[in-house]
Amino acid sequence: MARASRALIMMQGAVILAASVSQTPAVTYYLAVDVPSKLSGAEFAPNQIVRSVGAAYAVSATLPAGTELLSLHLRANGTWLFSPAWPVTLGGTTFEPRDVVAFDGVTFSMALDGSVAGLPANTRIDALLQFPSGDLGMSFDVPVNLGGNEYSRSDIVRYNGAFSLSWDAEGAGVPASSNVVGCAIDAAGNEALTFDVPTRIGTTDFLPGQLVRWTGSGFASYFTDGGWPASSQLRDFAFAPAAGIVPDGFHAPGPLLTVTQASGGQITLTWGASCLASDFDYEIYEGKAGSWYSHVPRFCTTGGALTRTFTPAGGSSYYLIVPRNAVAEGGYGVDSAGTPRQAGAGACLAQTAGACR
């Protein structure tokens, strides 16, 4: 992992540490299933979005009865994108399996009208992601001809007003008997997918429910739940959107963290914007100087502001500035040995720190 410099400012007994590089994300992802499924002892339905943390499962969202999820993606603003397995009416609009629906927790809206985009009526989007550029990536349940180009049911197709091949499944070695039914890109930029049936590539067998990493030249296991039920199919999955880092003078350019004295014994912290445009808010952690992992949340939001004035804790304190989006917080920085600094007690959000890009 790359090492970055730390910004260290001392003023009137306060030690200020600016967050720098990211920490390796945990294996946390969101998923849907095709039938009622028992996962880690609990029952989950096809209209539920399920969060997995190391194969410990919990419900993140429940869609209206009759909705069956087929594809899934989570945006940094907290909006879900999905395609229904069958036509369904939500909020007065009927959505087809070739459409992409946006759901902000309250309202359903059309993110992609498949008929307008030119997807045939018999086509279902069974894997979905959104690239950092904003383009959609999707795979289908059947081979499809779009704009005169043939795509297999396991290809990943990019859409930005026109369709183009993003990833050639057959060229990568995926057998025609298997269908890619899930794809996502994690915070570190790793591409992952899942298959509908047991799939042998080379000498390795990959099972339904298993996340498989594409290395650029081959496949490797990304995550396996040894207790995944044979009767259930994982219907797409999504990683939590990554949050970034504040400027550190090395990995992320911009104004470094500064501290100035304010009236009434207060201090004012000021810092530069996150390296990821999708981060819209910031957290301030406070700890006792000399006890470098004692930081706890002082503010879980600044309302998006790049400055905050407040009264510091008594004695010598250190502060960490951590960017966040609607779903996750970013990097806390590294210690003097270059080891990523861990979250303290009672973190504001789960951490999904990603590389600046």
Image (spheres, rainbow, N blue to C red):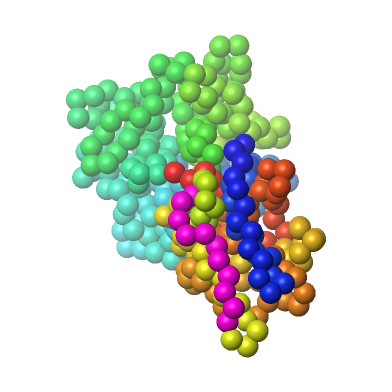
Q: Main secondary structure of the magenta part?
A: loop
Q: Residue 23 placed where, x, y %?
A: 63, 45
Residue found 30% across the figure and 48% down from its top? 112
Q: Residue 61 placed where, x, y %?
A: 54, 57
Residue found 48% across the figure and 23% down from its top? 216
Residue range corresponding to the magenta coloring: 252-262
Instruction: Judge from the rendering whether residue 195 lies leftward or rightward of residue 24; answer left or right.
Output: left
Q: Is residue 188 magenta?
A: no
Q: Residue furthest top?
A: 203
Q: Residue 206 placed where, x, y %?
A: 59, 23
Q: Is residue 106 above or below residue 57?
A: below
Q: Residue furthest bottom?
A: 264
Closer-to-camera residue (336/323):
336
Corner quadrant of residue 209: top right
Residue found 61% across the figure and 31% down from its top? 222
Q: Residue 155 placed where, x, y %?
A: 38, 26
Residue 341 can be seen, yes or no: yes
Corner quadrant of residue 208: top right
Residue 28 can be seen, yes or no: no
